[in-house]
Amino acid sequence: MGSRFVSFQEALNWVESHVDYEKYPGGIRTKRGPTLSRIRELCYLLGDPQKSAPAIHVTGTNGKGSTVRMATSLLITASFSVGTYTSPDLQGIRERICYDNTPISEDEWADVISLIASLEPMLNEDLTRFEILTAAAFTYFADRGVAAQVVEVGLGGTWDATNVIDASVSVVTNIGFDHVEILGDTLEKIASEKAGILKENSVAIIGRVNQEVYDIFEKRSREVSCEAILREGEDFGLLQERQAVGGRLATIWTPRGIIEDIYI
């Protein structure tokens, strides 16, 4: 591609022409095999935008979306500008990539997708749809100069395209049986896959899991030298949750005090 996409739809058509493993997740392991090489190479060509701001990285079987919304809400309330990346899209693809809870505009979308399309021929393999969207999010956040990123894992953790970030905070909401054909057929195998987002000097936050599963995260945190590991029920927890317009309000306790009325 030698020129800019002239419209949102043209850029979207290019994105949708790529293989979509969100629709056919089993293909990740059976066709290409797990790798971060494509997304790492693309990010390098883009100037490593994923390193432009500290990040909160969220994985887990359930509750990722609400956790991402909560983290974004807290950061915005604290006067941080926030780039939020979520999946899948429910109403439209632009909602995956937000600046202060506002989706990327159609013109901004066309610009960032045009840039990625111009770089794809330099790679050894075609990108996947999710890799394109992930790189687009990082690039957009860097261009906007966000103070913080909140990034939701697409699938698993270790081999997810979002795992090119070295997050300051790594969150595991919970562990259950999901995508067992890819992640493994036991809770321990699934936990090991998701534990891959824990990074050196990061703070690991672990939701309610059984002791055997928690031990996997604790072991990983030691191996990579996490700064700390916090466990729900021991180091923080939910005090109250109530209904609000368009969502819910939560009150939580933490080692540093009680935080009230967090919108989720």
Image: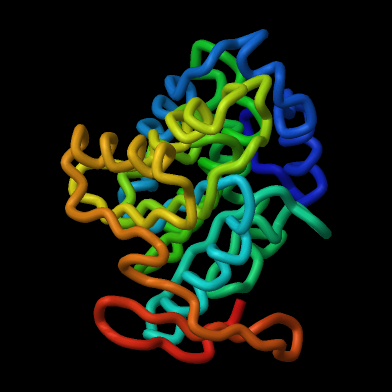
Q: Quadrant of the N terminus?
A: top right
Q: Quadrant of residue 164?
A: top left
Residue 248, image x, y percentages: 67, 82
Q: Quadrant of the C terminus?
A: bottom right
Can residue 2 be seen here? The reply is yes
Given residues 73 and 16, the one toward you in this image is: 73
Is residue 101 depicted above or below 134 in this figure?
below
Is residue 92 depicted above or below 134 in this figure?
below
Name the residue rendered at 21%, 46% in the picture: 226
Is residue 186 depicted above or below 112 in this figure?
above
Is 254 displayed left or right of 194 in the figure? left
Name the residue rendered at 53%, 90% in the picture: 261
Can residue 53 be seen here? The reply is no
Residue 17, image x, y percentages: 78, 28
Q: Quadrant of residue 223?
A: top left
Farthest front residue in view: 211
Name the residue rendered at 77%, 51% in the picture: 7
